[in-house]
Image: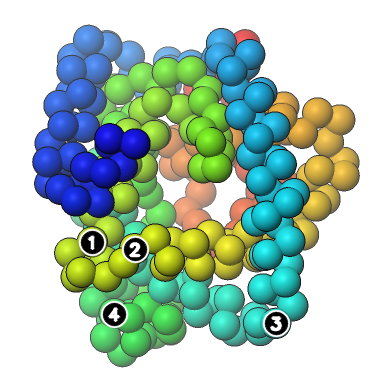
Amino acid sequence: MRIATAISRQPQTAIRWLLAALVASALGCAATSPQHQQISDSLEPINRPVFRFNTAVDDHALGPVARGYKSVTSDGVRSSLANAQRNLGFPPRFVAHVGQANFVEAGSELGRFLLNSTLGVAGLFDPATEAGLGKYDADLGMMFARWHVPPGPYLVLPVLGPSNPRDAVGDLLGMAMNPLLYTGTTVAPVGVLFAINTRAQADDQIRNARASALDYYVFVRDAFVQHRTARIRGEYVTRGDTLDASSHVMADELYDVE
């Protein structure tokens, strides 16, 4: 709660505090390269109750609201909101590319942000893709991995879902970079709308996964680990489509769930 308050009221202070904690962790584990990092589910006794809570929230609140929202909105509206959400995620994505020395990708993302923020009406539309500028997704957790920061154990966060300590710090820093924080806009309602929109777009994949998985907790955990493995190894570039479970690339031994 204190961290969330710091981010909403004093984002620069929160960034400095979190960076200091991350640097301390990096100095302590600087020899751990991305190719030798592992993630274990040592927190499973804690993770499973949190996962059940998240599933209950989805069953009784987020899921029904998202399906109702989907029934009254068009594909075009949902796609435009997804475009706007991605556009607002530019700052941490740009920093992550620069921090990995991916300057071509950073330049493409900068061009996309400038073009979509203007001609694309605050990112609701995507003229950058029509102009031939590719999407190169990245996040601060990926950058920290390239800096040899270990992930720590698999972690299920209340409401937010699968993560690990390294990625959670990266996500908090990314939240502090949200451009809306510096415009006086109330961020929470926008975030709720984006969450409902994202959940609506993924509804079919989630229903299929829950129907077919013998243990939904294990399915989500393994899908998350495989997804992070592929992203950190740079095995694919996201082109804007929502990835379902079949899109996760199995990469051996970067993350070993034990």
Q: Residue 147 placed where, x, y %?
A: 25, 28
Give left or right: position of 25 versus 165: left
In this picture, is 188 found above or below 75?
Answer: above
Q: Nearer the viewer, residue 48 or 216?
A: 48
Residue matched to label 2? 187
What residue do we see at 73% from left, 61% from top?
Answer: 64
Q: Nearer the viewer, residue 185 or 137?
A: 185
In this picture, is 215 found above or below 55?
Answer: above
Q: Nearer the viewer, mark 4 or mark 2?
A: 2
Q: Residue 46 placed where, x, y %?
A: 59, 18
Q: CA distance from mark 1 to mark 3?
A: 29 Å
Check whether the beta carbons of the residues at disc 4 and disc 1 lie within 8 A of each other. no
Q: Quadrant of residue 136?
A: bottom left
Q: CA distance from mark 2 to mark 1?
A: 7 Å
Helix, strand or loop at disc 3?
helix
Q: CA distance from mark 2 to mark 3?
A: 24 Å
Residue matched to label 4? 117
What residue do we see at 67% from left, 65% from top?
Answer: 66
Q: Which mark is residue 181?
A: 1
Helix, strand or loop at disc 1?
helix
Q: Earlier in the sequence, mark 4 or mark 2?
A: 4
Q: Which mark is residue 72?
A: 3
- Figure quadrant of the N terminus: top left
Check whether the beta carbons of the residues at disc 2 and disc 3 lie within 8 A of each other. no
Helix, strand or loop at disc 4?
helix
Q: Earlier in the sequence, mark 3 or mark 4?
A: 3
Amino acid marked by disc 3: Val
Q: Earlier in the sequence, mark 1 or mark 3?
A: 3
Amino acid marked by disc 1: Leu
Give left or right: position of 109 versus 200: left
Amino acid marked by disc 4: Ser
